[in-house]
Amino acid sequence: MMYTTEKTTVAGGVGTSADRPDGTPKVQGNFAYSSDLSAHGMLWGATLRSPHAHARITRLDYAPALAIPGVSAVLTLDDVPGVKTFGMAVSDQPVLADGIVRFWGEPIAVVAAENADDARRAIEAIVVEYEELEPLVDPEVADERDSVFRRLEIRSGDQDVRGEVVVEGYYETATQDQAPLGPESGLAIPDGEGGVDLYVATQWSHEDHRQIAASLGVKDDQARVHLSGIGGAFGAREDVSLQIHLCLLALHTGRPVKMVYSRQESFAGHVHRHPSRMWYRHEANRDGTLVRVEAKLLLDGGAYTSSSPAVIANATYFAVGPYRCESVAVDGVMAKTNNPPCGAMRGFGAVQACFGHETQMDRLAAALDVDPLELRIRNAMGPGDRMPTTLQEIEGSLPTKRVIEQMRDMPLPPPDDATHPLHLPGGTGLTTDEAHVARGVGYAVSLKNLMFSEAFDDFTEARITITPVGVEVETAAAEVGQGLITICQQIVRSVLKMEHVAVTFVDTSQIGSAGSTSASRQTQMTGGAVLAAATELRDRVLNQYGGDDLDERGIWREGELIVTLGEMTDRELATHHVQFRHPPTEAPDEHGHGNLHVDFAVAAHRAVVDVDTELGLVRVVRVDTVQDVGKVLNPRALVGQIEGGIMQGVGLAVMEELVIDNGVIRNANFTDYLLPTFADAPEVMAEFIEEPSHFGPFGAKGAGEPPTISSTPAVAAAIRAATGRPITRVPVRPDDIVGL
Amino acid sequence: MECDWPRDLAEALEALDADPHASLLAGGTDLMVEVNFGHAKPKHVIALRRIQALQAWEGRRIGAGVTYTRMEHGPHVALAQLARTVGSPQIRNAGTIGGNLGTASPAGDALPFLAAVDAEVELLSKARGTRLVPWDEFLVGVKRTTRRDDEIIVAAVLPERLPERQAFGKIGVRNAMVISMVSACVTRDDDGTTRVALGAVGPTPVRARRAEELISAEPTPSAAALAEFARLVSEEVRPITDHRGTEQYRRHASGVLARRLLERCLAA
Amino acid sequence: MRITITINGIDTEADIRGPESLLTLLRDELALPGSKNACEQGECGSCSVVLDGDVVCSCLVMAADAHGSTVRTVEGYGDHEVLHPVQEAMLDSGAVQCGFCTPGFVVAAAELFDTNPSPTSDEIREALAGNVCRCTGYGAILRGLEDLSANNAIAGDQTP
């Protein structure tokens, strides 16, 4: 027993820019991503994919592939022992083609071979004959034919309300790809007893596990999904891609099997952000009060369900944005076509709607001849107001007015000195002289739900153990780069006053689900679970020993250390597990009404662009933002999320588009799917509003998605301001600016 | 796969003579993409990186192995400008002028310069020795050249004298590391002789001869003459619509870019 | 075919089967997975290595053509005790999120600072325009390297 009265203060707690624990291995190249894994005796897998958007397979002969030395297995749908389809909410996608292919790139067969080359040769050796079928690629035709995944018809308020000023518009957003730099990859290792361990980069290991176990036809405990190093996600890893294929191959061959998608294959192998077509009509009174919004949002979900029903719901619920409006009629339609399947991507439906409602707000301001920010402030929704679509009353914080006002007051950058080609549109291409540059400034504001909605049983599990050397946190939450690992450490440090906190990502057999790393939810959900577990554990330990304080030295009573950590040997006592839920939400009624969401966040963006109006080239100079974050847990990490999210919004605004021609992706590579480079990166100035959430650790709100949502329409508005062109589609093309 | 690492041209020619179907590997920035995507499976590669003669840049003779990084810091303004737009520093350290000629992509960044200055391509074979071919007889179609299987591209040969006033520009949607939608090179001599070549707006670089003729006759072109020059350039290019851009835009941008480059030459 | 490459100072022998890239050789045969494969066409910079003194994309180097060459990969920067200044700078500024692009940035930035110890912001941005990052929006990377550049400038001023 040691006695002391010197207490330490812990570093790296909540509110600090604590370092990432995985930072050092990542800069050294030692961090093991899923594509870096290997195992003794490992085979390589590969996937045969459809070259057609819609076809009947009339012949499939894989004998020539099996005849190649080094090829161990060729599997088709016949080899799937369990459920032959997969999918998150709806299991409708065949694990391998069921005789018909419904989108370009649909997996038909998988192979395993001694090396990647042999696997590729095996794929090429499989003989497939197709009878091509007419692909359904126009979502409007799909809508007419009632080929849809979900329809919503929201009618709120008095439908006869009319405004004195009316603006209408038609808008489009293109298909965006998440393009995480780490391609889909994984390693499946059979356990020799009919079970399998899968090491994979995923956003939600337990949901993968559920689908894998079902298709393998094995007991739950026979499939274990381990989180491997994840090279970004942004929604692309919420759906199963190669998970089931890898496990099938491993069980079939009895050997470890690794698979890594090429970049081209990655574009075919994961879902994308839905392209949209949107018709809007806004009506306001002369004083600027928004009184009615009518809209139809048509999104194209592609061939299989994925998360499309939830995406169209989000787009529809958030169709009006963060504004009050007494009368609403919004229809949402998610078309089912033969285009590549779409699903989750950062912003999840709110991105498309925001481009529509924010462009409308600018048009309305112009029609009313008022300042566009004044118009938004006048109609800004806040706590106590009801969502115009769902009629849910806003609980907790929603500082819409404040984010707009604070953004308005941020200083604008001076004109650029153009001392370097990167300061001009066209960059080092030297296309542009200063004389041809027009500057524009544009604004947009967004509203996003946080965490899962519509009565989904959204929970997360976490386990915390006090050990002689510190604290261990166990979770199955996916650290995709966003920094959840650091947030968990910081929360524990602040609660338990112990600096050494290790976060361990455990497999699906060792803990329950942490839910998906999506919907801006992990800070509030897994962060919340860790806070609850740490707090309850601390209370229990203090109770047990009659202490009044706890830190990394041990338990204290009245200023004296009474038990050291090393002496707290009772592991039963020193471990605490929680299953943590957010307040329940309701399913929508037939009108789309109900308390569907847990929490909301708003953000405001201001973009400054320089446009070469004659050549239609854009340089995004600055994007400034004020974001509603509840509480800043880690300032440096938060800025990182905001800058990165804005960049994806800028990408959609000016360059990112999957070019899909009759169902076929024409630019499935990084030469032609353009991601913003260093030379395209705007400066970002970010400020935060800290009004605590009613639900979240220390009042924090999820912060990952809002930066991506209103940055896109802000850039589009800035281009509109610089050029006078309507700019009704993103990404904005040079032709749209030039007016061709 | 078999690989030869010749130290000099004689060794390289010997290897190529023995197997005219061998793949010639320079910087790898084109061939390796084909390999990585499974489109090319060379059985025999002759790696040219170690041949000193190809690295030489002597006066008007630019060795085929000269990289964009070296061109970026070389004496010709437009060549340096175009080199700076090629890919990234990583690509510029590997990619060569010989590779750009050999691949003969319509979007090849060095090609409008070589076309504008009427460069020649120096080819060497074991059987016939050296052959000099004008650029427009060398580049004959999309990724098609008149290089014979037993020939190695040895150098790009520039004329004795280059106009000091020269300018290059390249249009892409991204502000760096982008394949061109339109590129252009304009040169102007002291006597007014003007040349304009455009890339990515035809199977091979397009010389806008009528525009050249018009503007070469104007010692101090008026605004109207410049506008007519731009109009003629737009008329003379032969662009297509593809996933990188539309035919209309390329036509429009060709004229605008060529006019701007000419204005820069006139102001220089 | 057997080739010899000096990798991070170590003479390494390797058997080459076909036209595979240096990146494939490093990752799949030589147990050096630090260089990342993200695009296979030189458009992302994640596989950057230094080949005979020049930073290149190892996905576009035919492994066979690296015969007799000197290669430095991300594993050759810093060691277990001391990080390379670029690595330190990127950690300090929060330039690492998912980290998949990070090895390529480390290599390309280290080479930039090798030739130009105090680059301007524009020089940094142009030199690293071939390294794509999908997480950070480049802001934190730029701040880290600007800080390093400023520190080098001070250190340079103090050196007679």
Image: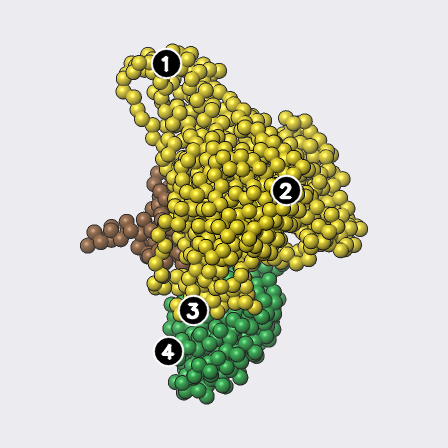
Q: CA distance from mark 3 to mark 1?
A: 72 Å
Q: Nearer the viewer, residue A231 or A605?
A: A605
Cα distance, mark 2 to mark 4?
64 Å
In the rendered image, the quadrant that contains the N terminus of chain B is bottom right
Q: Nearer the viewer, mark 2 or mark 4?
A: 2
Say which chain is yellow.
A
User: Few, some or many C-alpha atoms within 10 Å of disc 4 (few <14, some 14-19, many ≥20)?
Assistant: few
Residue drawn where x is 57% and y is 28% of the image: A584
Q: Residue at x 55, y 47 (%)?
A: A291
Tag 4 near tag 1, CB within 8 Å: no
**In the current view of this chain or complex, which residue is farthest to the right?**
A58
Disc on res. A436: 3
* Residue at numbered disc 4: B267
Chain ID for green: B
Residue bearing mark 1: A547
Q: CA distance from mark 1 to mark 2?
A: 58 Å
Cβ–Cβ under 8 Å for marks 2 and 4: no
What mark, if any, has residue A155 been given in the picture? 2
- Give x and y (percent) for residue A56: 78, 50
